Image (cartoon, rainbow, N blue to C red):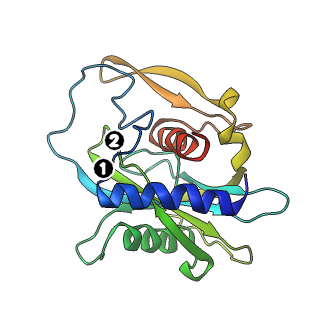
């Protein structure tokens, strides 16, 4: 898939979502999508992540982070850079770019924002807006050691191949919970991150 195709498909979905026009529903809306009727938080706090697609040659990659083991939520998990929306953030784009600079030191001057895709609700009470951005190589990363243990890249093609999508389960709060996982080598990519990647796969291939 080319950068131009990504820009076209994501841009069109972003415009339709923003305008309230009908769109085909993505596979997942939340951590609860695969688990039937389960208790959900009473309210969801707004958050945003950047989905950084890096223009590498010969193939586009996805930049991801490994969270530190002492984070209060999603400790040790693989995630997109991002976080909770602050009162002085103008919108989800501002949140995603600010958090990316704070967490991994990726300057926004290397990021071409393409658009927002379908929001995703987590079991920890966040409604996350994924902001897709095309990243120009030449940047450097400096991980915040309080939040990020590692920064790495995975070929986008890995996530676009459904052979790499699987549904796993584990017991959480006394219940068996099912979720998507898309392992890459020794990296176990699962939960909300895999859910958002599943939705991105839908946007880019349907």
Callout 2 secondary element = loop
Is residue 138 positioned above or below 67 on the image?
A: below
Callout 1 secondary element = strand
Q: Position of residue 80 (x, y in %)?
A: 52, 55
Pointer 1 residue: 127
- Residue at 53% across, 22% down: 167
Location of the C terminus by quadrant is top right
Q: Position of residue 31 (x, y in %)?
A: 37, 34
Report crowding for label 2: few under 14, some 14 to 19, many 20 or more residues within 10 A (C-alpha): some
Mark 2 vs 1: CB contact within 8 A: yes
The outermost residue toward the right is 58
Occupied quadrant, residue 53? bottom right
- Residue at 32% across, 71% down: 91
Q: Position of residue 136 (x, y in %)?
A: 69, 74
Q: Position of residue 181 (x, y in %)?
A: 56, 31
Occupied quadrant, residue 148? bottom right
Is residue 135 positioned above or below 71 on the image?
A: below
Occupied quadrant, residue 51? bottom right
Judging depth in this view, the residue of 23 and 132 nearest the camera is: 23
- Residue at 61% across, 36% down: 188
Q: Is residue 104 left or right of residue 38?
A: right
Judging depth in this view, the residue of 176 and 136 nearest the camera is: 136
Pointer 2 residue: 122
C-alpha span from label 2 to label 1: 7 Å
Q: Earlier in the sequence, mark 2 or mark 1?
A: 2
- Residue at 33% across, 29% down: 32
Is residue 170 positioned above or below 116 on the image?
A: above
The outermost residue toward the left is 42
In this view of the protein, can residue 147 be seen by the observer?
Answer: no
């Amino acid at each position: 898939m080319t950068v131009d195709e990504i820009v076209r498909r994501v841009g069109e979905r972003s415009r339709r979502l923003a305008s309230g026009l009908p769109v085909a529903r993505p596979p997942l809306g939340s951590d609860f999508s695969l688990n039937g009727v389960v208790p959900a938080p009473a309210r969801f706090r707004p958050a945003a992540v950047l989905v950084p697609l890096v223009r590498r040659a010969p193939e586009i990659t996805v930049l991801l982070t490994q969270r530190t083991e002492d984070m209060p939520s999603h400790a040790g998990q693989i995630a997109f850079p991002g976080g909770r929306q602050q009162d002085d953030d103008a919108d989800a784009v501002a949140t995603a770019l600010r958090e990316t600079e704070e967490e991994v030191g990726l300057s926004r001057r290397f990021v071409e924002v393409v658009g927002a895709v379908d929001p995703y609700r987590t079991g920890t009470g966040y409604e996350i807006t994924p902001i897709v951005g095309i990243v120009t190589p030449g940047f450097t990363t400096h991980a915040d050691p309080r939040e990020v243990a590692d920064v790495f890249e995975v070929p986008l093609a890995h996530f676009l191949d459904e052979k790499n999508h699987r549904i796993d389960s584990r017991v959480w709060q006394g219940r068996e919970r099912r979720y998507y996982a898309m392992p890459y080598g020794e990296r176990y990519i699962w939960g909300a991150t895999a859910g958002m990647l599943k939705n991105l796969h839908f946007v880019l291939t349907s």
